[in-house]
Each structure stands twice: as C-alpha cells, then as structure tokens.
Amino acid sequence: MGPICFLSDFGLADDFVGTCKGVVATIAPEAPVIDLTHEVPGFAIEAGAEILQHATRYMPADTIYLAVVDPGVGTGRRAVALRTGSGALMVGPDNGLLIPAAGSLGGIAEAVSLTRPEYQIQPVSSTFHGRDIFAPAAAHLHAGVELSRLGEDIEPETLVSLDLASLETEAYGTNIARIMDIDRYGNARLSILEEEADFDYGAALRVDAGDGEMPVRYVETFGTAKAGELVLVPDSHWRLSLAINKGSAAQALALKVGMEVRLTPEGGAGDGA
Amino acid sequence: MGPICFLSDFGLADDFVGTCKGVVATIAPEAPVIDLTHEVPGFAIEAGAEILQHATRYMPADTIYLAVVDPGVGTGRRAVALRTGSGALMVGPDNGLLIPAAGSLGGIAEAVSLTRPEYQIQPVSSTFHGRDIFAPAAAHLHAGVELSRLGEDIEPETLVSLDLASLETEAYGTNIARIMDIDRYGNARLSILEEEADFDYGAALRVDAGDGEMPVRYVETFGTAKAGELVLVPDSHWRLSLAINKGSAAQALALKVGMEVRLTPEGGAGDGA
Amino acid sequence: MGPICFLSDFGLADDFVGTCKGVVATIAPEAPVIDLTHEVPGFAIEAGAEILQHATRYMPADTIYLAVVDPGVGTGRRAVALRTGSGALMVGPDNGLLIPAAGSLGGIAEAVSLTRPEYQIQPVSSTFHGRDIFAPAAAHLHAGVELSRLGEDIEPETLVSLDLASLETEAYGTNIARIMDIDRYGNARLSILEEEADFDYGAALRVDAGDGEMPVRYVETFGTAKAGELVLVPDSHWRLSLAINKGSAAQALALKVGMEVRLTPEGGAGDGA
C-alpha cells in the first residue's frame, strides 16, 4: 500500500498527532505519513469531509486515508474501515466523515467495524480513539493485514451518510447549490464543483439566493472581474464561489451559510420572468 | 535504529525545526523523523519531560529521542546522550528533560557528554545547540556511531534529576499527588498515573487539598459523571484529573498548580474523622 | 537526488501543504520531504529568500529546493527550475525568491521555464501553482526527469534578481549594511553575515545609522554584554544584530527597517572625527 494520508482536528499544539505517528511507526515502520491537515475546525465533520474528498484528486491511488474528526468518541458510534472501488482504504469514525471521499474513490466495496482488540492499542482510552483504534488500524492495513480481519463486516448502507453536495438540477438547466462557507472577504463557497457545472467560462447566468435574480458572470480567475462585478469563480478546491471584486458578495446578496442558491444560465428557465 | 522522535519548544513559525531536519538528513539520509510536538511552552522543562515520558508508551522500542527544551543554552549545562535499559537512545540538554522518560525506558545504562567537535556542526552557535549539537548527535547515532564515541562517559547519578511524580503513598492507602496543571475548564491534572492508583473505576474516595475532605468518585469517562459531581478521571496521558461536570474543580476546591492533594479510598485512614 | 526541502507561505491551517505532498508522493513515492517552514509571512519574497539561503548551509548537497512565495501567481511571472553550480536543484516562481540561495549554492548553471503541460497537474489552477506546477516539477526531478525536459531553456541573467545583502565596504574598512528586520525586543538584524565581517569578537567599532556615531562592541553571545551596552552579536542565521542588553537598540538609535547602517572598526576612517 501507499502512504497514510492523515487528517484530523487535533491541531499541532499538543502531542496527539505525534503520538499517533509513533503508533504507526511501531506497527508499520516503513509507512510514510502525509499530514493533509490537522487544523480542521474542532468536531466539524462536514468541513473535514470536504477536505478529504478534495484530497482524493491529488493523493496516490493506493493511499490509506486516516481521518479523525470525532465528536462521538466515547459514545456508541462505530469505528470503521472501508475499501473503495478504486482500491484505496479508509479508516475513521462512522459519522459521515469518510463518505464523500469514498464516493469520489469509486464507492464503498467493503466495510468493517473495528472491533478486534488485537489490532488496537490496549488499554483503549475512552477519549482518544485516534491513537488506540484508528492509527493502529491504518498501520496494520499498511503492514498487509486484510481489511476483513480488523473486525466484523458491515453493510455499507448502514454507515452514517453525509451529502456534501446537495446539488440538484432542475428543468431548463437551473443548478441549486448550497452555501458551504463564507470567507472573511464575503466570498460564498458553493456546494457545486466546477466539473458539475453545465456552463462554461464566460457564460452569463442569473443567481437567486431567495431575494430575486441578479446577473452573474462565470469567470476562470477573479482577476478578470471588474470592480464591483458579481462573478462566479472556481476556488483552489474547484468549488464555485460567488464573489464581488472589491466588495462583499455575502453583504450584497444577504448570503448565509446553508442557504440555497439557484444558478440559471441565460436562455434557461427564468427567462420569461 | 528506529525513528528519531523529536520534541522541542521551537514552534513551527520559524525554520528551526526544518533546519534541524536538514542536519539529520545530511548525516543520516534514511532516518525517519517523528515530530512529537514542537509547541512545548517555551523553556518549560517539566511539561516537556511529561510529554516525552508519556510518548515512550507509543514509540517503537528502538527510537532515538531528540528533545530540546533548553533554557540553559550558552551556559555551562552539559549536552548529553543516554542509552536506556530498554535499548532506546536519548539526546538532549542535561537539565532533567530526559530523566522521567529514561526512567520509563528501563533507566539509564550509559551516559556521555556531547563534547566531540567532529560530531557537531561547526561553528557551534551559542544559542542553537538543537541544530549544532543535538540533531547531529541523534543523526550520528542513527547512522551507527557508538554512543561512547560522541564524548566523555559520565556517571548517570551526576545528571540533573527531575521527578515528575512526587507521588507518595501513606499508610491506609492514601495517595499524595501533586497538581501539575489546571486547564481552562478548571480540571486539575494530578501527578498520579492510572496504573499507580490502588483503586478501581467506580471506587468512592475522599480528596483533601488542604481545606478538608470532600467525596470524589473515580470514573472511567467524564460522561458518566452527574452535573455538579466531583470526579477523578484519567486523561489521554493516563494521568488522573479532578473534574466537576458542568463546573470548575479548581474553583470549588481552591486548587492551584503545585498543591499537594491527598486521595484516600473509603474505608482507608481518614474514616474515623 | 536527495530530499525535497519545501518552503512556503501557505501556513498549516489549510490543506495546501498536504495536497502538495500528495502530488509529490504520486509522482515520486520515495521522495522524502523536509518542511523548512510554511510560515513565511504572506507574499514576503525577501524573508523567504533569506530563510532559503540560510538553509543551504544545513541541507544535504543533493537537495531539491521547492519554494513557493508567489504574489504574482496568475500573472505573467514565469515558473522556473534551476540547477546550481553545486548540483542542487531549485523550483519556484521567477520573482527573486530562489536567487540568493542559488548564489550560495555555486550560482545558476542551468535554468528552464516550467512550460511543459505533461509535467504539470491538469487542469492548472490559476491560483495554486504550488500544487499544479511547482510540486510536480520537484517530484519529477526527484524521479529522474532531466531539468531540460521540464520546459524551455532560459538565460539565467533574465531571471528576476534579488540582492539580500546590499552590503558595501568602503575605504578604511567601513561596512555599510541594511536593516532587514527589527524584532519585538528592538534588536535590529543587519544584512551583514558574520563571515563577511572584517573584524573579530571583542572588536570595538563605531556605528552610524544616520544620526551620528556611537560605540559598539562585537560579541559572540548576548550574555556577555553589560546592562545598557550596545553590542553587535550574531543570530542563529549568522547575521549580525544590533542589540542593547535590557534595552531597545531600535529605540535608542531610532532604527527602522531598510535603513543603512555604517560599521567602522576603531582605528578606521571615522577616527579623526
């Protein structure tokens, strides 16, 4: 197997990440670990899931994903490992964190619940499953242990689901996206990926965030927008953002995280309105 | 030898850690480095020693510990390397930082003072021995240089000592622990490790921080405490903490760092009081 | 080739660094990556160049330097790779960032513009060339691709230059240095390196920052200065700093970043004044 790609909300101020790497090195001394980020906002499952899904585009095909954003540690939530359709492996809590990435990696081909004590660090702490359950599982997988040996088979459809996109396409080419995030400049990051958009750079669209339509132009780079112009532009994760050059899209359109936004190409459904 | 486990108070804002890794890679290109943490509070020898000791439970047996929390750099304090009873190696300043971990690794079997210029980076800076003395020593050890070649033998009993625990057990099973740390929730971390406690989960105890006794219950997880209940609970380093669910133990018991705390199981010494 | 030494202003809060490492691992699975620092102040080309140049003293001779401080991303600035006289390789934007380090590594022997799409990650984002152009180039070089295959040859003299030192020596041994930085203690870091100074520890000098001369002593360590004494002392990057023990040199001499400072050994030019 390839590297272990490690994402968490542990931060780097404490020894949590380093301790997990000690566990990995003890079980699988040759396993390289790539720190994707350890600064996922605390307990923010959806933010972690988005970063993990995006990373699947840039990591080696045989990566083992080790992801720990785990507000449910110590409760009954399952600890799981997955094999994806593409052959990548994933380890983490059963809270949806792994699901969008697994979708991008060919879906879930096999899933187990991490219940075998011999593949855990004993005693298992009630608060730090990253160290005692998840890191050892990833390391054992790197060392060649079969996924099915780590615990009981579970049905993929019983896993807690998480849908980042919630993107729908209506008649006449209207895309309904959700606002995932608004940054400090007032740019609103949408749930729609560039590749999902059925319009091209330069296209004229209308955007409706619930308060009437406004014209918006789809551009490749922010630098091509005029001052004050509302544009739709891909960010470094290839998600489309609503932005105003030298202004705040969030303020101008009264945008809030979670809102639905309708994007209609000119010539589409809303034309007659 | 196994990986180099690197702990410091350098932080990650500067290039100190990266420069030390360059030195290691120059001398021992194959040596993997595990960053335990570089955010030990500045010059906090005891905090660094506690993290290092805890890490010995989770690192490979053949680890080379490289630890730099070094308020005495530029003074006469010695730079040392140790071989422990378990076979692990340690490199760092002679200020107590390595001592508790060495104790957990089977004690000190051999110690040398890092005085040989040919195993240092020349010129040796007066302020950055991490780069010029400690990192090269760890790397040379990884590359197979014998410990005794790095400098003069020294008697282990001449090393500056540091006792994290200062835990005593009195008659009738009373444990006297010290408060190492109080966190922002008012939880007080004690010097006693779970494995040193001579009572089990569910046990009823009395705690005395100098101001009279209070009942306390020893629980496995904080989640089982009732609101307002004073409990004793193991943290992720397996040290026992005094905590109040939805309250502040530090405030309720007027606790301060450094205080002694007496823990007596019900049925023990204080019963007749 | 040796390790990839990676410097950027990406910070560690996001997944930028981790994503670049995924790209490297995909192309060159065996390539070790040394994080020099990712906390270069945003867009601060000169600060990054200084750190990179300093690092060349401590990295393996066959290092591949990957440096990304890139305010011009998305504009016409070139992306380049260099071979130095010492055999080290460098990858980064053509904005001067690589130039001082290249100078310390024997000068530029060969330079190419990174224009070949087959050695980039497609599609190339308009904002994140670290991931799509620079990291893949460094990885392909590690994997054995010839520098000349990555793009068109360019003349080294057409590269954007950057001169950190701007150090001049006048008659009578006066060194004219520039103030690169002033820290929170009021210490002023000069552009002069210890090895460039033509005076030794203990030397008495006169310093003139534009407002008349003051005596200053050149010392090896700050600890040997008397309270209130103005000294010149080497820092961990071997640059000379003006400092006052228990005081602020910046305040006492009205120093500002960018100012020129004249240092004259006693017995030199200014003596008759």
Image (tube, coloured by chain):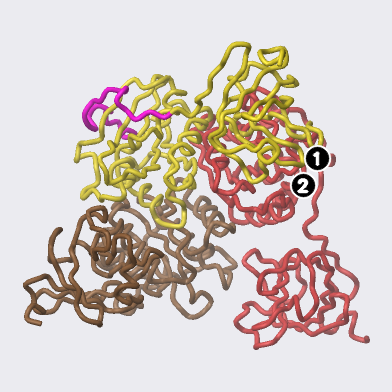
Chain colours: A red, B yellow, C brown
Image check: A20 left or right of C36?
right
Q: Residue A159 or B179: which is nearer the viewer?
A: B179
Across and down, in percent, residue C175 comes to 17, 74
Label 2 Cα neighbours within 10 Å, binned few <14 / some 14-19 / many ≥20: many
Q: Chain of mark 1?
A: A
Please tell me whether residue C177 is drawn above or below residue B52 in the rendered image: below
Q: Which residues are magenta?
A: B141-162
Q: Residue A270 or C163: which is nearer the viewer?
A: C163
Q: Residue B225 or A84: which is nearer the viewer?
A: B225
- On whether residue C93 falls in the magenta region, the answer is no
Instruction: Tell me the kind of residue under disc 1.
Output: Pro
Image check: A170 left or right of A246?
right
- On whether residue B159 falls in the magenta region, the answer is yes
Q: Nearer the viewer, mark 2 or mark 1?
A: 2
Could you tell me which residue is drawn at 39 percent across and 39 percent down?
B31
Could you tell me which residue is drawn at 33 percent across and 79 percent down?
C158
User: Residue C80, labelled with which disc?
Assistant: none
Please tell me whether residue B158 is drawn above or below residue B271 in the rendered image: below
Across and down, in percent, residue A47 comes to 70, 56
Instruction: Tell me the kind of residue under disc 2.
Output: Gly
Quarter holding residue A85 = top right
Q: Quadrant of the C terminus of chain C?
A: bottom left
User: Residue A96, labelled with which disc?
Assistant: 2
Residue that mark 1 sits on: A156
Across and down, in percent, residue C208 comes to 21, 77
Please tell me whether residue A248 is drawn above or below residue A27 in the rendered image: below
Quarter holding residue B194 = top right
